[in-house]
Amino acid sequence: MHAPDAEQSDPPRQAEPWRRRLMRSLLYGRNVDRAAKAKARIGLAILIFTLGYAVITARLVMFAVAPDPHAGRRVIGHDAVATARPDILDRNGEILATDVRSPSLFGEPHRIIDVDEASELLTASVPELDAPELRERLGSKRRFVWLKREITPRQREQIYRLGLPGIGFLPENKRVYPNGAEVAHVIGHVNVDNQGIAGIEKWLDSRGLADLHMAGLATDRLQKPVELSVDLRVQHALRDELVAARNKYKALAAAGLLTDVRTGEIIALVSVPDYDSNNPREALDPTRINRLTTGVFEMGSTFKALTVAMALDSGKITLKSAFDARFPLQYGKHTIHDFHAQNRVLTVPEIFTYSSNIGTARMALSLGVEHHKQFLRKLGQLDRLRTELPESAEPLVPRRWAELNTVTIAFGHGLSVAPLQAMMAFGALMNGGHLIPPTFLKRGEQEAMALATRVIKPETSDKMRYLMRLNVEKGTATRADVKGYYVGGKTGTSEKVVAGRYSKTKVLTAFTAVLPADQPRYGLLIMLDEPRPTPESHGFATSGWNAVPVGGAVISRIAPVLGLEPRYDLPTSDKLILASAPAR
Amino acid sequence: MIRLLNILVIAALVLAAADVYKIKFESTRQAQRVVKLRMDIRRENDAIAALRAEWSKLDNPARIQELARRHLALKPVEGRQFDRLDQLPERPPDLVPVDDPDPIGTVLANPELVDRTPTGSLPARAPR
């Protein structure tokens, strides 16, 4: 289109020197208006540069507004091998488990000049190292070998001074449990790579921490700590008393459990013998298992509370009902005796306080097998109880449930449950009838109520608490009557099965308590495995002579810690609990 | 005119380059500082974690109990040592007038002034 223009401007161009004309024709072609073309090109250049600067500006703004997400990770990350775990705290914020950074020693065999010298010097600084193994490792063809995980800062200093090539340190997170064995059965432990092996530690991993580890992301210690429902002070007091009791009664094992009956929180869980979480090898010893969740036991007479609650809740049986306990109960070739035999007709409260096997058996029989089974299923006694702890035991339920099973299960034989499970049901009997799944994590009352299912009527719960208190006032549990705390409790002694028969001498004694009985807050379970008679027990090894006094000692020690207000001069249970309960 | 504009643009370019260089230099310095501070924070956090672990080890109830048993005459608290405020007995009348110049002397001179009523949480002391 510039052609005519070019035609016109042709003559002056003749004045140009030939060299310049050549250049121009090479650069722009012949017959082209240089000025117009240059203008267009400049316009294009301006456009390109403007676009370029616009992109740069936009990027700058983006950088300024959104911080670079990779910047932080590039700095951290490469040095922590054993990954970080969140701290575990008790309900008051005391540390139960935390990470401490400690150096680990590694070698790069291809960079080591003299293997013999290196291993000699290293074993001199770190005596725990095994010399032949060390030599073999350093002489191997691999590019990276661990020599010793978690050395002390002093050893690190010494080795650093040796100036050996091909030997280095990596800081690693090491899990430490400052309280040692006190909470071992709750929090469990980790392996050398900081992976949870047992207890809450394993539960943490199952919650996705393991996946984070895989991705190499969980190296930061700024993870949110996990708050447990456990109270370290109570846990310690309970353990201290149980260790003393185990020595005093020469029992195989002792276990104690304190739950908040209103929220299902586990405030303390102790099973001695236990192990030190810092030394996980001890956990392999089968006698050190957590008897409260991984063991199942025939709970003995403490189970009668469930039978009596079932009877009262059915509406067919009241506190005034009486059952014939004059003669031992003949059932096929089995005879059911009473330990504290009264040989007369007993009312329901008497059956409870004398812990009559015959009475409870008759009570259960009068309601029928199916009703009994249904009730226990409703209370969660026939299915495996799952908590945060990965270890759990399935209850041993008879495969064929005949009348004889109902008879024996009524007084706590023939059905083995985990003690934690029994305590869940016990809590429901006490707190007004709400079955709340137990937890090791902090939980509020409303949250608990949302999870709860109603299993018995509130009036039944009132009557049960009356019976529990009555049993402490004038029954088998008088030795646990700690003044001021209005304790209610039920004892239980079950004979252990030895070689297929119930043994007369090897028993498991238990004591379940509620405090205070009129305004239930806490449920306590004390269990002693094969306690021996002591000089002051007149040859008896039943619950009233060992588990109950231990329970009393525990209560008088933990109640002030729990902040329970002692109240004196309270009326007896028939006036305080029964009279205030709404009439049905 | 054009020449002046060119000179101005070149001057602006030089200034801009110098400024960019300065910013770049500064940002490198800041980045290094961030890295250093982050490492410091990390080291501090590690130290805090170690100290906290040590603290809770020293604070362990079993250890405190053992120390208390060995060195103190104190005993565990019992329920009867607590009481409610409204159950406190009335404040006894002053033993001596408030403006007594020598209250101790007055009490010593009149031993019958001392109130020997046992209080709620403590049992009556056995007579010596």
Image (cartoon, coloured by chain):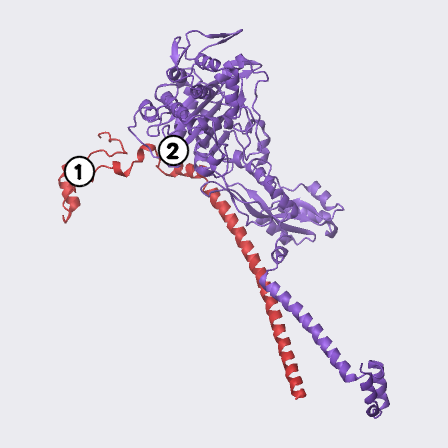
Q: Residue at x 26, y 38 (%)?
A: B86
Q: Which chain, by letter, is red?
A: B
Q: Nearer the viewer, residue A165 or A222?
A: A222
- Are the residues at dot 2 and dot 1 in contact (C-beta closer than 8 Å)? no
Q: Nearer the viewer, residue A58 or A583?
A: A583
Q: Chain of mark 2?
A: A
Picture quadrant where residue A402 is located: top right
Q: Nearer the viewer, residue B93 or A262?
A: A262
Q: Which mark is residue A523?
A: none
SS class, disc 1 = loop
Task: Identify residue for label 1.
Answer: B114
Q: Is residue A555 visible?
A: yes
> What is the x, y in percent for residue A86?
55, 45
Please name the amino acid that badge 1 sits on: Val
| Image position of A105 with respect to A387: above or below | below
| Residue at mark 2 shares a chain with residue at mark 1 | no
Q: CA distance from mark 2 to mark 1?
A: 35 Å
Please name the amino acid that badge 2 sits on: Ala
Q: Which chain, by letter, is purple?
A: A
Q: Which mark is residue A559?
A: 2
Picture quadrant where residue A457 is located: top left
Q: Is residue A298 visible?
A: no
Q: Chain of mark 1?
A: B
Is A85 placed left or right of A582 in the picture?
Answer: right
> What is the x, y in percent for residue A294?
56, 28
> What is the x, y in percent for residue A58?
63, 66
Q: Residue at x 62, y 69 (%)?
A: B24
Q: Residue at x 48, y 15 (%)?
A: A367
SS class, disc 2 = helix
